[in-house]
Image (cartoon, helix red, strand yellow):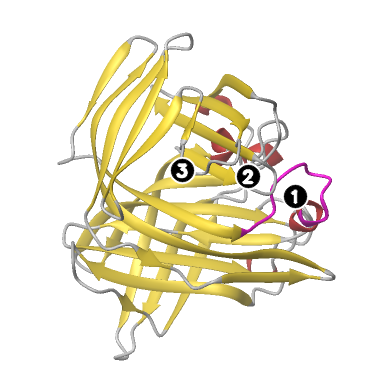
Amino acid sequence: LALGVSPNRSVMDASFCVIHEGIQHNLRASRHLGGERMDIHVGPISIEVLEPLRSLRILVDDTERGIKADLTFTARALALEEPRFTRELGPGLLMDYTRLTQNGTYQGTVEIKGERITVSSDTWLGTRDRSWGIRPIGRPDDFAQQALLLQFYWLWAPVNFDDCISIYDLNSDEKGEPWHTHGAIAPLYEGPPETMESVSSRIQYRSGTRHAEAAEITFHKRSGEELVLQFEPLYQFYMSGIGYTHPEWGHGIDRGELAVAYDSIDLASVDEASPLYLHIQAISRVRMGGKEGLGVLEQLILGPHEPSGFKELFDMAP
């Protein structure tokens, strides 16, 4: 689920997506903000804050398209604030924002096309994030959007283990030099996070794509110890479902008083070289020492990136 508030554009938009039996179902909605940021509902999609920084409720009710949900997120670790993202580009400011990430459990039900799925907190783990500030949204002819399409390398990886959670991110330029990177491990519930001295990552790309067949993230602790997280992608969620890089349903686009739409993606027939499907979250099995957990490896890689061997806007791995 995604819900965005764009006060300077007076737009609130939301998306709810479910992968079920090989199909990614994408429900999208947009409305005029009307000056009230705390009314967090958009058509059939809404969020309730049950307990700040601890529990949220997601409600979806679209009878026409056969998508319903009543899900409660409950934190299993403290919300972690990532370092501030600031990216200048020529005369413009591409990004200046901050984000928190919080791992937790989900409980409730999801209904897709008449089939009801029970979501139990003992087996359904996940994450939520919340960002605020300046970022490139709106119509793709805006300066920042055009600049973003020239080169962008992004990895983001929150992971749930039985006794802890971890978070990693990386933005780097065409030479592979990081302009934003961060890593931390936190115990469950109330324990403070341990921020890493430095972090690094290595991607093995699947041929014909810019997506990871396998990945390795190394945490360099302040004590000198190293921890290696090995990612085994299981399947992929396409971020265009919640608006990223989508030509019609991008974030912050004014679609009138209220607009609601639905489409679906057959995962077996996706052209992974298409720009619409470059931005993904790979749901992954993750090993760290003797621990095994589940997480996502988000990837958006556009343009040149020397360490990966990419030289053009959309050339793929051999």
Q: Is residue 305 above or below residue 75?
A: below
Please give the range of residues in magenta. Answer: 134-144
Q: Residue at x 46, y 37 (%)?
A: 39
Disc 2 target residue: 278
* Circle nearer the viewer, 1 or 2: 2
Q: Is residue 155 above or below residue 116?
A: below
Identity, as a three-letter code, of the amino acid under mark 2: Leu
Disc 3 target residue: 38
Q: Is residue 18 above or below residue 173?
A: above
Disc 1 target residue: 314
Cβ atoms under marks 3 and 2 closer than 8 Å = no
Mark 1 or mark 2, earlier in chain: 2
| Image spot of residue 258 (x, y percent) | 61, 23
On screen, residue 271 versus residue 109, left or right, reads: right
Q: Is residue 247 above or below residue 170?
A: above
Q: What is the quadrant of residue 109 in the picture? A: top left
* Crowd band around label 3 with a 10 angstrom C-alpha radius: few (<14), some (14–19), many (20+): few
Q: Residue at x 68, y 60 (%)?
A: 152
